[in-house]
Structures are given as structure tokens and as C-alpha cells.
Image (cartoon, helix red, strand yellow):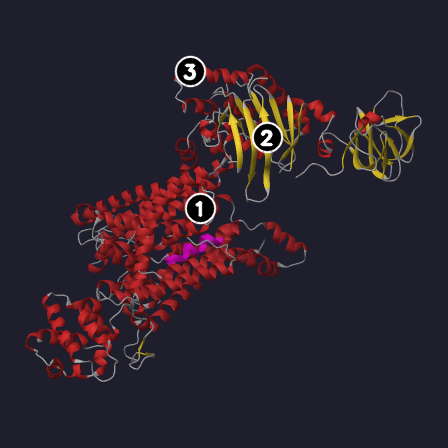
Amino acid sequence: MREGPVARRLLRLVTALVLAFLLAPMVAVILLSFSPTELLALPPRGFSLRWYGELLDSARWMLAMKNSFVVAGATTVVATLLGTAAAVGLQLGRFRGKAVLVTILTLPMVTPYIVTAAAMFFAYSLVGLTGSLPGLVLAHTVVAVPFVVVSVLATLQTFDATLLRAAASLGASPATALIRIVVPNIWPGIAAGAIFAFATSLDEFVITLFMAGPGQFTLPRQMYASVREFLSPTILAAATMLFLCSLLFLLVSEALRVRAERRGRA
Amino acid sequence: MRRTNWLAALLIAPLMLLILGSFLLPVGFALFTAVADREVAATLPRTRAALAAWDGVGLPPEPAFAAMAQELGQALEDRRIGDMAQRLNFERTGMRGLLLRTARAAGRLEAPYAASMVALDARWGEGDTWLLVQRAGGPVTPLYLLRAMDLQRAPGGGVQAVAAEEALYRQLFWRTLGISLAVTALCVLLAYPVAYTIAKLSAPWSAVALMLVLIPFWSSVLVRSTAWFVLLQREGPVNQAMMALGLIDAPVQVVGTRIAVVVALVHVLLPFAVLPMHSVMKRLDGIYLRAAASLGANGVQRFLRVYLPMSMPGVLAGAAMVFLLAVGMYTAPALVGGDRDQMVAWFIAYFMNREVNWGMAAALSAYLLAMTGAAIGLARVLTGGVATIGGRA
Amino acid sequence: MSAPIVRFRGVSKSYDGRTPVVAGLDLDIARGEFLTLLGPSGSGKTTTLMMLAGFEDPSSGSIELEGKRIDTVPPHKRGIGVVFQNYALFPHMTVARNLAFPLSVRGTSRAEITTRIAKALEMVRLSGFGDRRPQQLSGGQQQRVALARALIFSPSLVLMDEPLGALDKQLREELQLEIRRIHATLGVTIVYVTHDQSEALTMSDRIAVFEGGRIQQLGSADAIYERPANAFVAGFIGENNRMEAVVADSTTLRLSDGTMLATAPHGFSAGERVIACIRPEKVHLAEAGQRAPVTEVVYLGDHCRLRLSYAGLPDFFAKRPSLDGVALPQVGEAVFLAIPPTAVMVFRATPHRE
């Protein structure tokens, strides 16, 4: 559709403003995190890594960072393995009710986190899983795994099932075919799902708030506690680092998507 | 074929078990908790048995008084009285005091208990007190689901509204719904031109613009809410900027207002509206618009009668996604909102962590789930089952 | 003849439990032969092939390979080579690694694999292509690789499911010859599925014509063309003028408009309703005989095709070879037909179906 020059300029202006609105807060936080003083003023008066130094010197923040990465790492491994296996199974199987299975497996994605958190807290406390890192990993896996399933299923759509028949005719057992034929062909989808799972766990806050024990601060939980306590630019340094992690994940996942699209066309 | 299905089942089973055990069962258990009534039955089993035969007229027979006195004393000794006292106190204020007082005095009470308990506290002489205990015997109660709608059981049976000063939840749900709908509407209105423009941009620019939408989409809700918390401080950059521009004379308090909640929510959820709209618009073929033009439709007609209806699935998917996430959002309002701006999620957390009233937390969760389910269902119906809802928050 | 390499006994297949895709199939495949399963789509030929490969389970009946029942043997343990229509080359592997795949899953030594890859590439005339990715090859080259991959582990039986369907005509003919050559060189048994009858006639030792889940006729190319077993085979293989008729006596048929046709309807009694088929190239144009007006003339180079109005049929075709110095008939003219009694094939009116 061709709109008039005025309309087009107006649309572009609105778009630019909305994009600015979307990005401004993060830009401000990044700038403020380099502020030499505690004063939250823009533009910052000078440049300093002082708050990053404090972040790295703080035992609390470092513990939180360690916890976050341990939980996110474990969550990613479990979610990627189980999610990929289930997606492949869903694609392979010839049975009714597949849509129902997919819906069930992806329910945690559409359930409000607060409901998931409350329900898990009820149930996990009965079996003594609250306040433990394994419990937290389990909880994070539940909310992260649907992204792996969805991502791998999407990639499997472009996977030619004849290749499995070809592999079988050439003497490969189903397990061999899975490892040597399926996985190498869908790895961009698996990797994208794994990254999303890692990011989900790293950023997850609501469930952690309920499930984690008193000593088990993760980065988001530490950040939330600090904001409520005293607003120091250290928090902004932490926020900036989390943001940079997200940015990295975004870039890698985009690269994977482009790769997968190319492969899909080939 | 059969072998393949076995292999498929084997691959799906581990995740299915995980989801079943650590998600579906917990959610099911939570939903049951919304109607479960376990405390009185667990703490006062003999009293409950003695009350079972009572017809509710006048006062229960002596054995019920005796059992109550003994079991209260025992429960206090075993430190098991708290949950039950809280359960009954939640239904009628003052019950905790009565129960604790009676429990402490249990050693001094003697037969006939009916007389000595009424002498200790006149409320034991009221039929309503005993009716309350009898009805709380379980196994299920509509108490929490009713209360979460500001209703209660009337003494004579039936349902009535709670006293006006105790009413809280209907307003809470209206507020949650109102904020969520406002945020959804704002997101759709802002996202549509953005998605449209990005879909129209030429090659490198469309990718760049889309990337700018994806950056906030990928960064955490907490980080972004914290950013708004910082920006909207009294001494924060937004106030400074507005003062520098002469828009205001003195810093205004934004954090802790409804405006802050809506701004933060729109910011957090806007990408979820842009992305589904964009993915639909990207595929909208110019051929239909050219066809419309060849059939004599002008620009406005082409937009209203061809482009808008064809982009509707994306709009509905985006709107459903935003609403779904807004309705259950905890983080952003908790950080930038005041006490009067909190939504259902905050109250669920409140009942979980501070009140330790799992029944209410579960009842509110049940209603929240129902709202979410309705939003998904509506989106499915409106798009003819096309809309797939997914994303993260 | 030695014991058959494959033996189907009463094999039926149905997906919904009611409509059979393959019905009561009995078929022996001889060692070393080139057998083509030919039929229209939905006739059951591909399902038959897939049951032999192990990708589909028969609903009933048994399949034997080398004298042993293979119903419970999974596909990867059958040792049957398969060539797929879309090649099914593994896109993430080079040509050489595609060829190495069946050997490496069998634990063949690396040195042996290298030698055999070189031989296989040479056999399909693709030496030097080992390091390419399948996507970098043309369709014909990809199909050669697929062929080499299905043969490299020396299976005694190779199945081909419309392997040339995606190629253009010239390439298809080239590869047909190549497959014939490989078949002759290696002496493997090939079961080949196609819906292209000229492909089937060119390549096969024997052809099984499928229709409605059953084999309508099994025989050599010339037997099927010259002596079709029923009206379906006659109509499906080659061109045919199909006419309803009634047996008048032991030497004559009466067509529906009363035209009499001389032939010898063996095994039919007078008054029986039959189908008579005449191939267009067997219809001779003569100086005198039965008169037929020309309604269309299509020039096809080596011959021309005449649409005639004959015996009440508006679409009766005859082929006339192009001859030097003889003018083509014109539309509106009439020609005279000479139909030799041996050219008329007579079939039962109800074709063999269920």
C-alpha cells in the first residue's frame, strides 16, 4: 500500500518515538551506571567504573551471580535435553491427540508466573524441595522447557522425514539416526531453545522469590531486594550487566535464526 | 510404525512426567487448596464427630463441649492450634481470641463443660459459634472462592455480600482488569503503526528496527522495571528533564502512582504486541492491495477494508498476549506501583508470604487462571484458532 | 529358476481397517531381476515397496526375504538398499560422508570405506565430487549419489521409489540407461516403482501392473504390451481405442452402432458383452474398407495422429507413419480403415477389480 508522503513521515515519526520509548530506559540506566557520584542525574557528570568495582567486591552480589549462573546452567541442560527429546518424539509419533500433548507441554508458558510460583510453593514445600537449588532448577526448568519444545518443533517442520527412512535403509538404528541425522540437522533450533531457556532462568524472578531459600539470592532477587533497600548505582551496574547478557543472547539467537532460514531454503 | 510410536513415547515421557509432577499436579493441588477445608478436621476430630449429629438448633450436646475443651487444650500443648485458629478467624474475626483463650483455660474447665465454657466466654453459648465450627469440618468449603468475590455464607444458608468495609477483592479484580485492558489498548495502538512501518521498511532498515524491538523483548522484566523505578525517582532523570523543560516547577512523585504502573507495563509488554503483528503484516502480500486498487478502492478504503481485516489475526494475537501477561504481572507493579495500584498477583504473593493464608492465595490464583484462560479462549475464537500464544515475561 | 529372493504371500494393507490399499498380494521376485511395479497413483505400488523396505507394516500376510520372514525385522536390519524420489541425501554431510554412512554404521574399517567410496563414485561417474555438499550438485548428480549410496554396502536387493520422477526428460533417459548398466554389471535385484509406463517398458525384465491394490498383470514388457490380461492393462499401457461390443459369433463382434468387427474372441460365447481394444498404430489406412471421416490431424514428426469418427465413436485414433511423398489426410476427408483381426483385443466387460 502506498500512503501519502505526509502520512508516511508521520508513521515513521511515531515509530521512531515508540522505539525511543522502548530503548530510552535501558540507555539511561547504562549511562547512569557509569556515573562517578550517587546522584542519578543525566547527562552523567564524568565517567567511572566505581559501581562496577563495588559490584565485583560485594560478596552478596557475587554469590547471587554464582547462584544465577549455576541455576541457569543446570536449567538449560535439563530443559534442552528433555525439551528436544519430547519435540522429536512429537514429530516422530503417528498418533492422535498430538495437539493436546503440545498444549500440555507448553502450558507453563501461558500460565501467569505468580500462579505457577504459588502452586509450586504449595506442592514443593510438601516434599521439601523449597529453599533448595535443585528445587529452583526444577521450577525454572518447568517454565523454560516450553521454549525449547516450541523452538525445536519449529525447526523440525523443515526437517525432511524421508531422511530417517533413508538412514534406516542404510542400516542405522533409530538411535543412531537420531544422533547422526536428526540432531545435526536441527541444531540451530536446539541451540536457540537452549539460549532462550538460559535467558529465561537468568531473568526469572517471581518463582525464585517464592522458591529460593534465605541464602539463595539470584541476580534478579538480589536486585529487587537492593532496590527496596537503598537505591545505589550498584544496582544499575548489575542491571547493565544483565542487559548485556540479554543483548548477547539476542544476537546469538538471531544469528542462529538466519542460519536456520538459510538451511531451510537450501 | 509401532516401533516408531514406542520410540516417540519414550522420548516424550520424561518431559511429560516432569510437567505432570512439577507443574500440573502442583497447579491442581493449588486449585484444590482453594476449596479445601482441612484445619478443623485435622485439629478437632472428636469435636467434629460430636457435632456431626447436631441439627444446628439451639446448642450442641454436652459431648461436643467436652471434646472441644479437651482438643483445644491438647492442640495448644502440641502447638497445632495456629492453622485452625487462623482458618476460623478468617471466616469470623475474633475466633482466634476465643479459641486461644479457651485452650489456655482448658485445664481449669470441668464437666459439665457446656456450663463452664459459657461461663468462660459467652460466645460458646451462641449457636452461630458452633455452626461455624460444624461447617468448617470439611472436606471442602466455598469460603475462599466466595471471599475472593467479597461474598460470604449467610448464617441461615445462602450467600451474601461481606460488610462494605471488608469488601476488597471485587475492586481488586476490576482494577486488575482495568489496568490490563488499558495497557492492552495502549500497546495495540502504539504497536500497530510501529509494526506496519517496520513491515514496510526496506531491507536493512526493517531488520534494524525489528532488532530494536527485540532488544527490550529479550531483556528481563525486572531490569526494565528497575530502570523505570530509577528514571521516575523524585530526583530522577524524568523529573529533572521535565523541570529543565519548564513543564513542572517542583519534582512530582511518580513512583507509587497508577501512571507509573501503566507506563512500566506498556513498556514491558509493547514488544509482545509488535512482534505478532509484524509477523502477520510481513506476510501480507501487496497483491491484495493492488487488486483492491484496481477495483477502485482509494487509500483509506484499501486500508480499512483490506489491510486492517487481514492484519487482524496479528492484532488479536498480540492483544491476547499482552492482556495475558498484564493480568498476571507481579514484578512491574510491585516495583513502581503504590499500595493502591497492586493487582491480583501482588495479593497472591501477599497471602502466600505474609498472611500465610493458602486458601485465599489459591482462590485468587484460580480466578486469575480463569481470566487468563478466558483471554486465550477469546483470542482463539476470534482468530478461528489461528492465534498461537507464546512468549516470555 | 532358483528360489525367489522375495516372496509376498497374501499381503494386505489397510490404513483405516476397511479400504485396502494393497489386497491379497502374492508375488515372487527372482534373484537378479529388474522388476518394475507400475500403476497409477493410489494403486498400491509404493505401499508394496514400503512394506518390503519395512517402513510400513502389512495388515496381514507375510513377506519373506531370502526365505526368512521379515515381518518383525526393523528396516535398518533388513539390509535392503532404497533410492528415494527426492534423493534423501543427508544435507549436513558431504557426498563422501553420505556414502560412508551405511559402511560406518556397519563398523567397516576406515581404509575399506575410502576404497569403496572411490569405487562407488567411479561407478556413477562422479569421481572428484566427494567433498561437495549435496546442495552443490545438480538433480541428476544428486540422484547418482543416492544410487551409489544405496549400492555401496552391497545389498542384494535395491528398491527404487520413482527415483527419476523429479528430473527432466533428457536426464531421465540418461539415468535410465545408467541404472540398467549398473543392474547388468552388479547383478543386484532391483524393484523399481514408477507411474511412467515408457520408463517401465524401457528398463524392466518384468513389470507388475498395479491397480486397486492388486496386480493386474505380471510379465515381460512385450507380453504386457502385446497381450494385456484385461481391459485395465490394455488401457493403461500404451494407447488404446476402447469400444463396447457384443460377441456376434466366433469370428465377429458387433459394436454398439452395429458395425461388425472381425476377430477371434477366444473363450467368449455369442451374445456376451465385451470390451474391444485396438491400438492406434495397428489401425491401417487402406484404399478401401470401413469408412471414417477425419476430424483432427496432429503432425508429430515421425508419425501423424488422426482423430476419426468411427463406429459411432467421436474419438477413434489412428497413427500413420510419415512417408515420403504421401500427402497427409485433411480434416473433412474420409479415410478407409483396415483393422486386422489379430489387432483386436477382447476383454470381459467387467474389468478385474475387487
Q: Position of residue B29 (x, y in %)?
A: 30, 59
Is residue B272 located in the magenta-colored stretch of the structure?
A: yes
Considering the image in quadrants, where does the C terminus of chain C appear?
top right
Q: Residue at x 57, y 14 (%)?
A: C185
Is residue C296 located in the magenta-colored stretch of the structure?
A: no
Considering the image in quadrants, where does the N terminus of chain C appear?
top right
| Type of secondary structure dominating the magenta stretch | helix
What's under tag 3, amino acid-wise?
Glu
Question: Relative to residue A103, is residue C89 depicted above or below?
Answer: above
Q: CA distance from mark 2 to mark 1?
A: 64 Å
Left or right for C314, reference A242 = right
Report the front residue among A189 and B52. Answer: B52
Q: Are marks 3 and 2 on the same chain?
A: yes
What's under tag 2, amino acid-wise?
Asp
What's under tag 1, amino acid-wise?
Val
SS under mark 1: helix
Mark 3 or mark 2, whichever is nearer to me: 2
How packed is label 2: few (under 14 Cα within 10 Å), some, or many (20 or more)? some
Q: CA distance from mark 3 to mark 2?
A: 40 Å
Q: Which residue is mark 2?
A: C26
Q: Residue furthest right?
A: C288
Q: Which residue is mark 3?
A: C112
Q: Which residue is mark 1?
A: B208
